[in-house]
Image (cartoon, grey):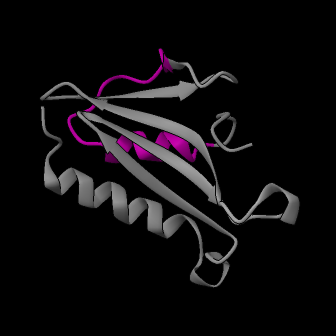
Amino acid sequence: MAVPDTHLRQIARWCEQRIPAHYRHQVRVEHTVRGSNVTILEVRAPWREDFGPEWTRRPIAQLRHDGTRWWLYWPDRNTRWHLLQDVPAQTSPAALLDVIDEPGRAFWL
């Protein structure tokens, strides 16, 4: 099931607004799409030469679309995804993106 383009643009804008432009050479927030799942990633510049030139990518959250509603998932330390039980499904990803930034949530370490 394809993710609506309007929702993808909304998610892309949200990701871009997380990090000020003058810091994006060090850290970015990006998203990837696989089927009807959108994964939010924290992407960091290489910080040690012996680790190589690749940027590191850490999953932050996953939004899953079932055709009408969006669900929010969080990753455990093994990157297994778990539904956030206290957050109801939404018809748009906007409210779920706001939850990711709520104080007390464990998305950003």
Q: Residue at 22% of width from left, 51% of height from top?
A: 7
| Residue 95 x/y as whole percent | 36, 42
Question: What is the magenta range?
Answer: 82-102
102 in relation to 67, above or below: below
Residue 66 image position (x, y, % from top left) = 19, 24
Return the residue nearer the eye: 109 or 55.
Answer: 55
Q: Residue furthest bottom?
A: 22
Q: Is residue 69 left or right of residue 62?
A: left
State yes or no: residue 100 in magenta. Answer: yes
Quadrant of the frame with the C terminus: top right
Is 42 one of the magenta-colored residues?
no
Residue 33, above or below 21: above
Q: Nearer the viewer, residue 27 or 97?
A: 27
Residue at image coords 30%, 25%: 89
The answer to whether any part of residue 48 appears in the image is no
Residue at (55% x, 19% y) in the render? 80
Query: Which residue is at 70% across, 72% downward?
Result: 26
- Residue 56 higher or lower than 106, as above or below: below
Specify the quadrant that holds the N terminus. top left
**Quarter of image, res 77:** top right
Q: Is residue 17 left or right of residue 28?
A: left
Judge by depth and name the residue closer to the eye, 103 or 27: 27
In the figure, is residue 44 to the left or right of 9?
right
Q: Is residue 91 left or right of residue 56?
A: left
- The tally of labels here is 0
Q: Give how far across and how far down residue 33 sits, in percent.
A: 32, 44
Q: Quadrant of residue 47?
A: bottom right
Question: Residue 95 or 69: which is nearer the viewer?
Answer: 69
